[in-house]
């Protein structure tokens, strides 16, 4: 009898535990909304991008009149006259893995003039990145990394069948808070932007009301099928939930262009290895006669003057600094200018 009683109790406990597990599983399943499922399926394809910029204060147009004040202040305490005081700025953005071989898309403004780039994956693993493609007009850039582990790439969707009011999910790193999820709806399509002078800047943008904050730039916008439909780019300041994303079709074109020009931009020799590094800088209204290129240690500094594209009296100076790869040869440098693009060729050490 005791054995039967014991077996009966064990069976009873087993039944209770099974029923409890079934109830818990059902409760969890009821909580798994479409948004939760999207996050589970796609979060590993979104990364954190940490960049470091070095900017010189001397005559830097972004400092306006304060640049001159900084010059005077620093010169009072500097024994090396002519050296430009500099600041090292760090910023955080987002990116999306579009090729498991290590290709990541982000906004061009996230990596513009970055002296160093680090990618932080979903599990915290890090990898040093290199910008291999930039398109300022579409505000898209590609970063290449050597994957520290197998990567999961985002599946590209389309926007031609996107419906107003459709639920979308944004994943990014606002204010450095990794893998932050927000959701909302599609508020508008084919939005166009113009400059204060009335010039067309960018079109065909998606308008969404999912909250986007600093650091979300370059992050992913998914539909409820878990497909990438856009790259988050901006939010209107002082507004209530008005954000914008670059449609995925523009990303697809950028990927095709990158693949077509990959061999040319890398500038490989016949053996298939890199023979030089190429740096490109888009500077509107560039004065071709006043461009200077200086190399000091492992830094290359570009300086010069520019005016606005309309030929008005608006003008200024620029100074940009970029770290050189360790195997770059600073003694073999060639400069060329095409339209408003300054192109620097730096040979690789033999």
Image: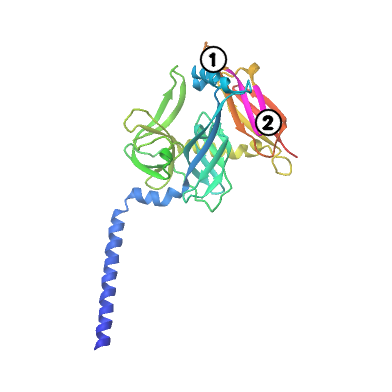
Q: In the image, is residue 183 part of the stretch drawn in magenta?
A: no
Q: Quick one: which residue is furthest to the right in this view?
A: 350
Q: Is residue 37 above or below residue 192?
A: below
Residue 300 position, x and y percent, is 64, 30
**What is the x, y in percent for residue 269?**
72, 40
- Dot 1 falls on a residue whose secondary structure is strand
Residue situated in front as seen by the camera: 201 or 58 = 58
Picture quadrant of residue 277: top right
Q: Is residue 101 left or right of residue 241?
A: right
- Give the labeled residue for mark 1: 315
* Count of numbered circles in the view: 2
Main SS of the magenta segment?
strand
Q: Residue at x 62, y 37 (%)?
A: 261
In the image, residue 304 lies in the stretch drawn in magenta: yes
Q: Is residue 285 left or right of residue 17?
A: right
Q: Which residue is mark 2?
A: 345
Crowding at dot 1, Cα within 10 Å, few <14 / some 14-19 / many 20+, comes out as some
> Measured from the top left, where is residue 107 in percent x and y?
49, 35
Q: Secondary structure at mark 2?
A: strand
- How far is disc 2 from disc 1 in space, using C-alphas? 27 Å
Residue at image coords 73%, 44%: 271
Above or below residue 148? Residue 217 is above
First in sequence: mark 2 vs mark 1: 1
Is residue 167 visible in the rendered image? The answer is no
Label 2 CA crowd tier, 10 Å (few <14, some 14–19, many 20+): some
Residue interval drawn in magenta: 292-305
**Quadrant location, the N terminus:** bottom left
Q: Residue furthest bottom?
A: 1
Depth check: give the residue in front, 164 or 130. Answer: 130
In the image, residue 157 lies at what x, y percent?
Answer: 44, 43
328 sits left or right of 155 in the view: right
């Amino acid at each position: 009898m005791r054995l039967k009683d014991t077996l009966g109790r064990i069976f009873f406990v087993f039944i209770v535990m099974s029923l409890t597990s079934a109830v818990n599983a059902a409760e969890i399943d009821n909580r798994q909304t479409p948004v939760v499922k999207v996050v589970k399926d796609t979060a590993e394809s979104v990364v954190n991008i940490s960049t470091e910029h070095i900017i010189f204060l001397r005559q830097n147009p972004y400092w306006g009149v304060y640049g001159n004040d900084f010059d005077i202040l620093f010169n009072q305490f500097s024994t090396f006259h002519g050296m430009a005081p500099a600041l090292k700025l760090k910023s955080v953005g987002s990116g999306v893995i579009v090729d498991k071989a290590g290709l990541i898309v982000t906004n061009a403004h996230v990596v513009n003039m970055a002296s160093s780039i680090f990618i932080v994956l979903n599990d915290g693993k890090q990898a040093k990145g290199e910008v291999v493609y930039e398109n300022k007009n579409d505000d898209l850039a590609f970063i290449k990394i050597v994957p520290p582990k197998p990567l999961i790439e985002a599946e590209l969707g389309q926007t031609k069948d996107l419906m107003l009011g459709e639920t979308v999910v944004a994943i990014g790193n606002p204010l450095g808070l990794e893998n932050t999820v927000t959701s909302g709806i599609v508020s508008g399509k084919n939005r166009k932007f113009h400059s204060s002078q009335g010039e067309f800047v960018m079109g065909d943008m998606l308008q969404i009301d999912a909250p986007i904050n600093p650091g979300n730039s370059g992050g992913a916008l998914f539909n409820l099928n878990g497909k990438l439909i856009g790259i988050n780019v901006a939010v209107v300041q002082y507004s209530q939930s008005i954000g914008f994303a670059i449609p995925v079709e523009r990303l697809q074109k950028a990927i095709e262009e990158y693949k077509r020009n990959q061999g040319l931009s890398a500038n490989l020799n016949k053996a298939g290895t890199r023979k030089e590094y190429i740096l490109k800088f888009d500077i509107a209204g560039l004065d071709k006669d006043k461009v200077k290129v200086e190399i000091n240690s492992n830094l290359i500094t570009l300086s010069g003057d520019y005016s606005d594209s309309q030929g008005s009296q608006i003008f200024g100076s620029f100074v940009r600094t970029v770290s050189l790869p360790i195997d770059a040869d600073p003694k073999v440098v060639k400069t060329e200018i095409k339209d408003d693009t300054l192109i620097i060729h730096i040979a690789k050490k033999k």
